Amino acid sequence: MTPIPDNVEGAFLISIIDFVLSFVIISGIGVILAILPVVNRYWVIDDKDLKGGH
Amino acid sequence: MLDQLLSLFDALLKQTGLAHLYWGNFAMLGVGGTMLYLAIVKKCEPFLLIGIGFACIVVNIPGSDLAEPGGLFNYAYKGVSLLIVPPLIFLGVGAITDFGPMIANPKLVLLGAGAHLGIFVALILAKVLGFTLSEAGAIGIIGGADGPMAIFVTMKLAPHLLSPISVAAYSYMALMPIIQPPIMKLLTTKAERNIQMAQLRKVSRLEKILFPVIIAAIVNLFFPPVAPLVTMLMLGNLFREVLLVDRLSDTAGGTLLNLVTIVLTVAIGSTMSAKTFLTLQTVEIVGLGLLAFVFGTASGVITAKIMNLFLKTKINPLIGSAGIASVPIAARVSHIVANKENPKLFLIYHAMGPNLAGVFGTAISGGILLALLGSK
């Protein structure tokens, strides 16, 4: 990997990459969270079962 | 006889700290005293500021060797510098945090990234002021408003700046109820501040159990540099959500969290000796930290307003500022500002979504910074 230059241009570069990638990755987490409720169709865990199971 | 007495007295005086007092000690005693005043009288984050302020006072009394190698405060600092304490703080935070609001409204996680513009503004300005890129990265992360993450990234990128960065991060977190509201009001109209948000769906137990496992896997896969923090956050949360290990959950979120908070605050305060703290660099870092918080708050609100251009059901842009992290202070500020505008508005649960996403936003930004700057 080419090292990022230790100057103001490098600071701009690292900031832009980081800011954009943060949006992309956090959007990915958002997508996973959006499809998470699908699991409720296949399995339901009752709080009472957990509390009484140990 | 008198000469002997005077010379003995002089030797005795030199053994004490009195002979080594200088203006810097008095200045730092003032800083420590102000922190105690804010904590005790103004009730600003007393859990953090009492330990930091007290340790700051003690280490600035000449002769005190508590922060020297072998001293008790030095061992507390070792816990921080070896990166043991910050992950344990996250374990405790995970055990007391309900991620339901974030899981229930996934689109709001975008605010967790949007409210981090301050990181990059501070990073670029730090570079302009002449800091190295690694130092600028550590200074920028103050804008993530996440104390343990700021410490973690600083110890990896610029450990010599731990004292001013951690003090700036924790101080501004304590001062968020003062810093954020004017910016939030400036950037929103009265109509926007009055937007009522729909009630969130109920999140099932299964979702709450799967969430920490999935997030821990993602973070370890994509962001190994910050994985220790988020992994421990998720472990603590799993303890909480499985409902089976109350003792572990209670210990992590209670006794252990209190214990490591004592260690952390004492360690931070012990780094605030006059000789290392009273420098131009500290003034610059404290100034950049404030700018980071201001820009982070503004960018969160603006991101929420941009989202409203595309959303059918509008969100109240006041929750945007909560994306800056600092759980739950920023969410509380969003709620209070909205509630003062309209007593019928209760935004706290809605604001917790972006607020929790902000923790991940800071972790992601920190992880990318560490990866780009070649730190393991």
Image (cartoon, rainbow, N blue to C red):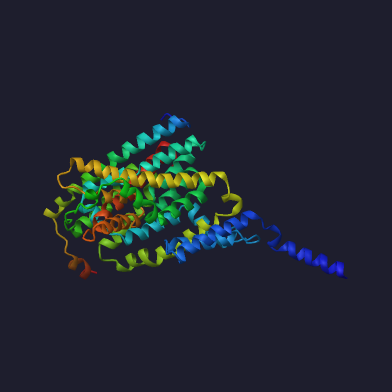
Q: Nearer the viewer, residue B33 or B158?
A: B33
The quadrant holding residue B255 is bottom left
Write the residue at 56% across / 62% down. B72
Residue B64 in picture, x, y percent from top left: 63, 62
The quadrant holding residue B140 is top left
Write the residue at 54% across / 57% down. B31
User: Can residue B133 be seen in the rendering of this structure?
Assistant: no
The residue lying furthest to the right in this view is B1
Q: Which of A37 and A23 is in front in this view?
A: A23
User: Can residue B165 be seen in the rendering of this structure?
Assistant: yes
Write the residue at 29% across / 43% down. B302
Q: Nearer the viewer, residue B258 or B48?
A: B48
How many marks the image carries: the answer is 0
Q: Reply above or below: A10 against B298.
A: above
Please give left or right for residue B271 compared with residue B6 in the image.
left
Q: In the rendered image, which quarter contains the N terminus of chain B? A: bottom right
Q: Reply above or below: B233 against B4.
A: above
Please give left or right for residue B34 compared with residue B209 in the image.
right
